[in-house]
């Protein structure tokens, strides 16, 4: 079912080394009719694709009767390993097929059910790396002034096409039935093309992803994923049960059907998924103003089609209708978490009573721009309310003008331009932040305009100085005791919060005794900033690469630690993870001591509501166990 607003997707060109030898066959009038019917375009197809199909039909009609001999690929034999895999088979899969340019997809069908904790970390890291590369490429293409992007959302298709040509799409060598390793229920994506990059869906345009009949020993296609946007009259959805309408029979950007749907392609595949009991991955599309695409795609887990019917719908036309029921035992429905988070935020804004389990409506007591509620649905622990909340650390003033190397700029316009001293000091070429305030690329340190600069607070180089833009809450957890999570959708690269506490200046090795659990040492954070905005896996050796390699200035290590034993903020409750969704970026503002940079937290992924924030503290296994 095509997304009404989706642009035409790029067509991968398979390597010529993979094309089987062609054998001539006689093109009879009957075969011409068959080809012509197969090339009949879908009524809701893209206009460009429809034009190409009509043109090919005219070419077939123009072939003279005495010259009807064509070259055609022989029908491939069914893959002996292409039968529908059993429900409890454990199969190891690789992340991508090859680095060969736009290789054809593999045909082996696999299901991955049992994943060890080590495997989960491995696959989660692969998915995160692919998403980071996609987001970096999309940002680069969007910022290129010389590139004519055409229709909106073309940057994401260009990024996914580049990754496909570099062999960076995940799991291209297999056809996965069931869950995708490294993708969690509730994961959010801003673009349909990103679903293809991580292997969650196989097409950036059609709503039903399926495995063709030629690759299934049973001889029938089976559907493996669907994208539900609720754009059809007959769609019904209550979360656990989804009534899904097939594709076709509808004009572009129209809701009602103008023609009968046909049981072919994806519709036929979803019918056989119901027949064979094959589970289907369900991704729901929601309108979202905070998303750069104005849409968000949420993976809601596995469903099974329990019925398949073909009957007149509400518009009077025959419609393929499928009833899918969510398989029990999975993580909480991602879309339900969005509704829960919205309800909590609405109550916070209206000063209404929060749901049971909330022990404080605002941990910060008004010191943050947005309230920070505290939830405990586990026990009666409330000791965190006894700490003093400090929103921002109080750094010591520079000792001399020699140490205070970053004095600020004298700009009077907003945003500060290329001649701004703060922008120049950042190096790397171009601005540090995008127009929406997201970080362009991680770097050793970001030099922002500060108190001694002449630009206003609306300057684009002050992204972290206007406070939190996302509602966060502290919650009690069985795994991490106290943790922090978001009630908003957070964009990749967006500013989240700042680490705060009492600043303790250090000289060389720490010569004071402190409980290690109450100290945040900036030097312990791994350099995860190097991963953000790095598109080198897709651009290395690219003759078309016009993106300059950044040259960042050298930055000394911070000369302080944060003591959070008495005063702290919500950032202290962010838990540790080897596959984090946020990272620390050093920030120095005009007029500040460079040995005391701010510890700013930025999003590494698209973080959906009710998802816990996690960061890499540089801890070893022994420290994690402790």
Image (tube, rainbow, N blue to C red):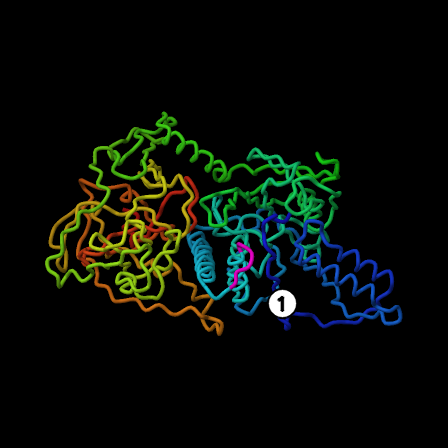
How busy is the neighbourhood of tag 1: few (under 14 within 10 Å), some, or many (20 plus)?
A: some
The x and y percentages for residue 492 are 41, 52
Q: Is residue 259 visible?
A: yes
Q: Which residue is mark 1?
A: 14
Magenta part of the protein: which range? 148-153
State whether residue 161 is above or below residue 282: below
To which quarter of the image does residue 55 belong?
Answer: bottom right
Q: Nearer the viewer, residue 301 or 547?
A: 547
**Chief SS of the magenta region:** loop
Relative to 96, 574 lies left or right: left
The x and y percentages for residue 399 are 10, 57
Residue drawn at x 75%, y 46% is 262
Relative to 379, 68 lies left or right: right
To which quarter of the image does residue 228 belong?
Answer: top right
Residue drawn at x 53%, y 54% is 152
Relative to 128, 78 lies left or right: right
Q: Nearer the viewer, residue 23 or 43?
A: 43
To which quarter of the image does residue 378 belong?
Answer: top left
The x and y percentages for residue 393 are 20, 47
Residue drawn at x 33%, y 41% is 484
- Asked if the magenta segment contains residue 450, the reply would be no
Q: Secondary structure at mark 1?
A: loop
How many discs appear? Answer: 1
């Amino acid at each position: 079912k095509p997304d009404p607003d989706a642009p035409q997707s790029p067509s991968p060109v398979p390597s010529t080394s993979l094309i089987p030898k062609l054998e001539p066959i006689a093109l009879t009038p009957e075969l011409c009719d068959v080809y012509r019917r197969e090339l009949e375009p879908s009524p809701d197809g893209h206009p460009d694709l429809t034009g190409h199909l009509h043109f090919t039909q005219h070419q077939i009609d123009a072939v003279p009767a005495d010259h009807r001999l064509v070259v055609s690929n022989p029908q491939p034999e069914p893959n002996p390993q292409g039968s529908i895999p059993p429900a409890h088979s454990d199969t190891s899969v690789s992340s991508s097929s090859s680095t060969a340019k736009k290789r054809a997809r593999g045909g082996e069908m696999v299901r991955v059910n049992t994943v060890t904790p080590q495997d989960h970390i491995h696959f989660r890291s692969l998915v995160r790396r692919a998403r980071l590369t996609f987001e970096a490429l999309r940002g680069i293409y969007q910022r290129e002034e010389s590139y004519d992007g055409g229709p909106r959302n073309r940057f994401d298709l260009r990024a996914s096409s580049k990754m496909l040509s570099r062999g960076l799409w995940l799991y291209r060598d297999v056809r996965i039935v069931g869950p995708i390793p490294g993708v969690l229920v509730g994961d959010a994506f801003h673009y349909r093309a990103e679903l293809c990059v991580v292997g969650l869906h196989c097409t950036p345009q059609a709503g039903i992803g399926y495995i063709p009949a030629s690759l299934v020993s049973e001889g029938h296609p089976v559907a493996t994923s669907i994208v539900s946007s609720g754009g059809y009259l007959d769609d019904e959805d209550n979360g656990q049960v989804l009534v899904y309408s097939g594709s076709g029979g509808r004009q572009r950007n129209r809701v009602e059907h103008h023609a009968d749907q046909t049981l072919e392609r994806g519709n036929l595949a979803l019918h056989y998924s119901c027949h064979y009991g094959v589970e289907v991955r369900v991704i729901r599309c929601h309108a979202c103003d905070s998303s750069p695409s104005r849409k968000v795609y949420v993976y809601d887990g596995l469903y099974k089609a329990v019925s398949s019917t073909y009957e007149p719908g509400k518009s009077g036309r025959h419609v393929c209708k499928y009833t899918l029921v969510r398989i029990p035992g999975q993580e909480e429905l991602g879309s339900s978490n969005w509704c829960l988070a919205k309800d909590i935020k609405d109550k916070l804004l209206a000063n209404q009573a929060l749901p049971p389990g909330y022990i404080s409506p605002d941990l910060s007591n008004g010191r943050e721009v947005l309230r920070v509620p505290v939830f405990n649905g586990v026990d009666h622990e409330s000791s965190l309310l006894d700490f003093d909340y400090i929103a921002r650390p109080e750094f010591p003033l520079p000792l001399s003008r020699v140490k205070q190397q970053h004095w600020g700029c004298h700009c009077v316009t907003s945003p500060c331009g290329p001649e701004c001293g703060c922008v120049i000091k950042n190096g790397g070429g171009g601005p540090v932040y995008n127009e929406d305030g997201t970080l362009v690329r991680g770097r050793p340190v970001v030099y922002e305009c500060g108190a001694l600069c002449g630009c206003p607070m609306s300057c684009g180089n002050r992204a972290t100085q206007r406070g939190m833009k996302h509602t966060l809450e502290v919650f009690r957890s069985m795994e991490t005791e106290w943790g922090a999570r978001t009630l908003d959708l957070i964009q990749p690269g967006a500013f989240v919060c700042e680490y705060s506490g009492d600043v303790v200046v250090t000289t060389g090795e720490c010569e004071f005794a402190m409980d290690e659990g109450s100290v945040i040492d900036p030097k312990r954070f791994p350099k995860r900033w190097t991963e953000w905005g790095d598109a080198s896996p897709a651009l290395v050796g690219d003759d078309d690469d016009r993106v300059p390699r950044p040259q960042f200035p050298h930055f000394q290590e911070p000369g302080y630690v944060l003591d959070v034993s008495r005063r702290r903020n919500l950032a202290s409750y962010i838990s540790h993870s080897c596959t984090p969704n946020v990272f620390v970026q050093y920030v120095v503002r005009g007029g500040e001591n460079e040995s005391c940079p701010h510890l700013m937290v930025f999003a590494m992924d698209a973080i959906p509501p009710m998802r816990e924030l996690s960061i890499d503290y540089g801890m070893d296994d022994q420290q994690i166990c402790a």
